[in-house]
Amino acid sequence: MRYKIGDKVKIKTWTRLEKEFGKTLNNSINTHCHFSSYMERFLREYIPNRIVTIAKIDYFNNSYKIKASGKEYDYKNYDYSDDMIDGWEIEKIYEPTYSRFEILDIR
């Protein structure tokens, strides 16, 4: 399990998951938790930017439950696994810190 509760992450798109993992016989993506077309429709309707917060972790199934916009979307069929997540969503880009020697260019 790569992420922890409270992490903001971005879910991959259907086309990207299909290219990476391929489809199964029942027309879902062949990821650990089987990304379905219902999950994709849910994300498009309710979370268009695909940025969610990890709400719960199921260590038995190696999956996550998500929440977004203050509402928890806790559906039994909507488990997300590490391979469906694009990575952490970076909220702020921090300026690098410089030492006083770098600022004054003292050598």
Image (spheres, grey):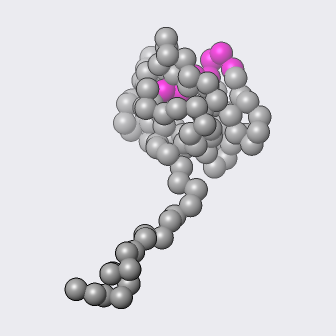
Image quarter of residue 54: top right
In the visual, does 104 lie left or right of 43?
Answer: left
The residue lying furthest to the right in this view is 71
Give how far across and how far down residue 100 sits, in percent.
38, 80
> Is residue 76 inside the magenta stretch?
yes
Camera-nearest residue between 21 and 54 = 54
Q: Is residue 15 visible?
A: no
Q: Is residue 76 above or below residue 105?
A: above
Q: Is residue 100 above or below residue 104?
A: above
In the visual, does 90 lie left or right of 16?
Answer: right
- Residues in magenta? 75-81
- Residue lying at 48% horizontally and 26% vertically, measured from the top left: 81
User: What is the tally of numbered marks visible in this picture?
Assistant: 0
Q: Is residue 8 above or below residue 41?
A: below
Q: Is residue 86 visible?
A: yes
- Residue lying at 56% horizontally and 39% vertically, measured from the top left: 7
Give how far across and how far down residue 53 sits, in percent.
62, 38
In the visual, does 6 lie left or right of 12?
Answer: right
Camera-nearest residue between 79 and 38 = 79
Give how far across and how far down residue 48 sits, in percent.
67, 47
The residue lying furthest to the top in this view is 60
Give how far across and how far down residue 107 sits, in percent.
22, 86
- Residue lying at 58% horizontally and 56% vertically, measured from the top left: 91
Image quarter of residue 47: top right
Camera-nearest residue between 28 and 51 = 51
> What is the quadrant of the N terminus in the image?
top left
Image quarter of residue 82: top left
- Residue lying at 64% horizontally and 29% vertically, measured from the top left: 55
Question: Magenta residues: mostly which secondary structure?
Answer: loop
> Is residue 50 inside the magenta stretch?
no
